[in-house]
Image: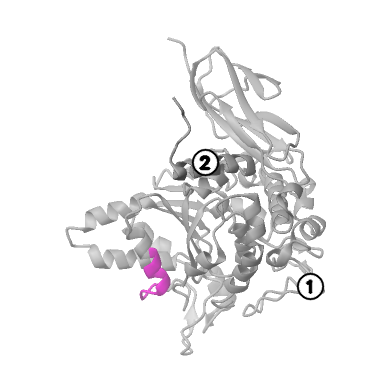
Amino acid sequence: MNAFPKSPILVLFFCLLIFLGTRGTVSSQIAGLGGVPRTIVTTDGEIDDVDSFIRMLLYANEFRIEGLIYSSSMWHYKGDGNGTLFTSEMEMTRNMYGAKTSLRWPGVSWMNPLLDAYEQVYSNLSQHAAGFPTADYLRSVVRVGNIDFEGDMRADTEGSNFIKEKLLDDNLEPLYLQVWGGTNTIARALKSIEDQYKGTPEWEPIYNKVTKKAILYAILDQDATYRKYIAPHWPDLKVYYNSNQFWCLAYPWKRAVPPAQQYLLEGKFMGEEIIRNHGPLLSQYYSYGDEQVQVGDEEHIHGDPSKLEIAQWGTFGPYDFISEGDSPAYLHLIDVGMVNLEHPHWGGWGGRLVQSEEQPNRWEDGAKVLDYNPFTQKMDATYPQIRWIEALQEDFAARADWCVLDYANANHPPVVEAVGDTFRAVAAGDRLVLDVKAHDPDGDELTTRFWIYHEVGTYPVQPVMVQTDNRVELQLDPTSTGQLHVVAEVKDKGQHPMTRYRRFVVEVKLKN
C-alpha cells in the first residue's frame, strides 16, 4: 500500500511538516499549526514592560497572543482629565506620591513604534521559525482597558470587553492572562460577566467555564483589585503569583544574579549582542545610558549617561540591563521541554511556583519555594529563576540575530526527544536507564548533561549516576522512595549557545 497521501492538499501538508522539521524547533512546528498556549497581555507601559514586550515579540511564535491591553497600576495611571485627585490604596505608592491627578503615564501609543519595527523584521524572523504573527494581526488585538486610575474598574472599557469576550467564547483551551501592571482591567471583565449572569440559570455554567479556562500570571499585586474583588468573587480562578523570583530580571538584578553571571546583563553583552546593530526593534530596547527617554514618565532617568548611579539599585554602565520584571509571565509559556506549563511547581524558564495551602487554586513563590544556589551555597528564593539566566540570555541574543541574519548564519535551538516514556514507575533498588535523541538544525556539536531537580522531587537521596553521551544510568537506593525529576539538558555550540531539555519524572516505590 502506498502510504503517501494522494490528495494535493495532504501532499502540501506533509511537505510543510518535512520543511518545518528541517527549519525549526518542535514548539515552532506546533506554533505554525496552532497548538501553542493562548495568552492576553495587560500592561501599564513602564519601561520594564517595554523591554519585556520587545523580548516577547521575538518569541511571539511560541504562543498565541490574543490580546494586548493597556491598563493601569499603582505606578502608572492616566487620570480622568477632570483634575480629580487620587490617593493610592497601596501603602508604598500612597506614601511616595500622596494625592495625584495622574501618575507617570506613558500613554496608549507606545506599542505602535514597536509593532512598526516588528513589521520591519518580521520577514527575517520568519526565516528562522514558523508561527510568527504578522504586525497587522498584533495591531488588531490592541485595546485600551481601564487606565484612569490605579485599580479603576468602575466601568466597562474596550479592553475589559475584549477580555470578557475571550473568556466567554467557545474556545475552551486555557487562556493565560498576563498581568504586567494591575489586575483592574481583568477584574472589570470578570465583574461584567458576574453582573450579567449572576442570579440567572446561566451563571453556574458560565462561572465554571471561566474558571476552567482562565489562568492569571501576576507579577506582584500592583493594585488591590485581586485582593478585593477577584479572590473573593472568583475563588476557583487559577492564579500564578510571582513576588520574589522575578527580581533577578528586574531593577535590583545586581543583588540577585551571581557576580559570575552578571556579564550576561552588562553593557558589553547587552549592547553588542542584543541591542546595537540588531535592527529597528531592538534599537528601541531601554538600557542604561542609552539616551532614550520614555515620554510621560519623568522618573525614567536611566538613559541619562550622567545618572548611572541609582541609589537603591547600584552603579551601572552604558547599555546595562535595566529591567524586564514581567518577562517570567510569558517565559512560562515557552515549551523548551521542561513540561512546566500545567505544572508550575515543576519549574522552568518562568520560575517555580507551588500550590498554596490556604488557597488551592493559587500557585506562588516566596519563602517556601527555595532552590539551592551553588554560587552562594545557600537555599535561595530567587534561584528558581536565576538558574535559567544563562540559557535565557544566550537564547535572547540568538533570537536578536534572527532579526538581521539569514537562516544559514544564525543559531537555532537543538531538537531533543526522549527515548521511551518520560513518566516512569520503577521499584526501589532498580537500575534505571534514561536516554534522549538530539540533533541540531545547524549541524552544531551538542553537549548533553543530565541533572536532578532535587527541590521539585520528593526522592530523598542522590542516586549513583553514570552518563555516557546521551544516556544516563541511575542506580536507585533499595530503601528510598519518592518522585525523581531527571532533566536532560542539551546545548549546542553555536555563536550564542541555545539550550533545550527533556524532563523525566520517575515514581520510585518499594518492591512488592
Disc 2 + disc 1, Cβ < 8 Å:
no
Q: Relative to 436, say whether 260 is above or below.
A: below
* Three-letter code for the amino acid on which mark 2 is drawn: Asn
Q: Is residue 415 left or right of residue 276?
A: left
* Residue where numbered disc 1 is placed: 307
Q: Nearer the viewer, residue 128 or 395?
A: 128
Task: Report the span colored magenta.
Answer: 153-163
Residue 199 seen from this side: yes
Picture coordinates of residue 306, whole percent (x, y): 82, 74
Q: Quadrant of residue 96?
A: bottom right
Q: Nearer the viewer, residue 421 or 412?
A: 412
The nearer-to-camera label among 2 and 1 is: 2
Q: Relative to 164, say whether 491 is above or below.
A: above
Picture coordinates of residue 240, whole percent (x, y): 47, 51
Picture coordinates of residue 144, whole percent (x, y): 47, 74
Picture coordinates of residue 211, whole percent (x, y): 34, 52
For the view shown, which residue lies furthest in the top direction?
512
Is 270 magenta? The answer is no
* Residue where numbered disc 2 is placed: 340
Label 1 secondary element: loop
Q: Relative to 78, say whether 410 is above or below.
A: above
Quarter that holds the C terminus: top left
Which residue is pictured at 76% across the width and 49% down the height? 409
Residue 336 seen from this side: no
Upstream in the sequence, badge 2 or badge 1?
Answer: 1
